[in-house]
Image (tube, rainbow, N blue to C red):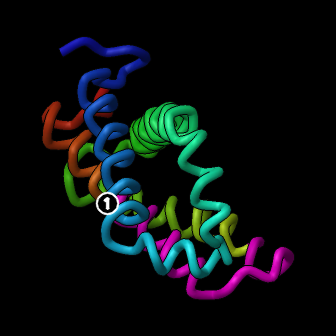
Amino acid sequence: MPRIFGLNIIAVLVAGIALWFIGALFYGVLFADLWMGLWGFGASDEARMASSMGATMGAGFVLSLLVAGVLGFALKALKADGLVPAIKWSVFLWAGFVLTTMSYDIVYALQPLMLLVLDGAHMLTGFVIMAFLMTVLAKVAVKD
């Protein structure tokens, strides 16, 4: 499979697409009402969101691809050369960077703790699945 900077580009693309779908599942199907309520969005906000849905989903897709690529580079740098190390490192990176960064919204923006739980669960699920996909699809996607 084609590699760019040691990363299997197909595996990274699949992982990014998976993260995007996980977000759609979390926020569009499973927890849409909870998420809207935690942010305090109402009917007028729904109409505004619907009018920019294409651009929003497109930007989210690009961000998902970027997150997958950065995770792939991190796993490569950490020499996560198998499924268990890749998942362990992805959980460590999620806890050390993603969860702690999202916690600033709880501390400084006074967001509800449940929003951190929901968003954190989304990203943890995504990180584990991306690590799984990048490892399994390329028999160690991040190998030199």
Q: Residue at x 22, y 51 (%)?
A: 132
- Residue 115 lies within the magenta run: yes
Q: Amino acid at mark 1?
A: Leu
Can residue 73 be seen by looking at this rendering?
Answer: no
Identify the residue at image location x=43%, y=63%: 27
Q: Secondary structure at mark 1?
A: helix
Observer-nearest of 123 and 69: 123
Specify whether 34 is left or right of 80.
Answer: right
Task: Identify which residue is drawn at 45% across, 62% down.
Answer: 123
Give percent across and percent down for residue 19.
Answer: 36, 48
Figure check: 10 above or below 16:
above
Q: Nearer the viewer, residue 86 or 78?
A: 86
Q: Which residue is mark 1?
A: 25
The outermost residue toward the bottom is 113
Asked whether 126 or 35 is in front, the reply is 35
The answer to whether 134 is drawn above or below residue 89 in the figure is above
Residue range (magenta): 104-127
Q: Is 117 left or right of 112, judged from the image as shown?
A: left
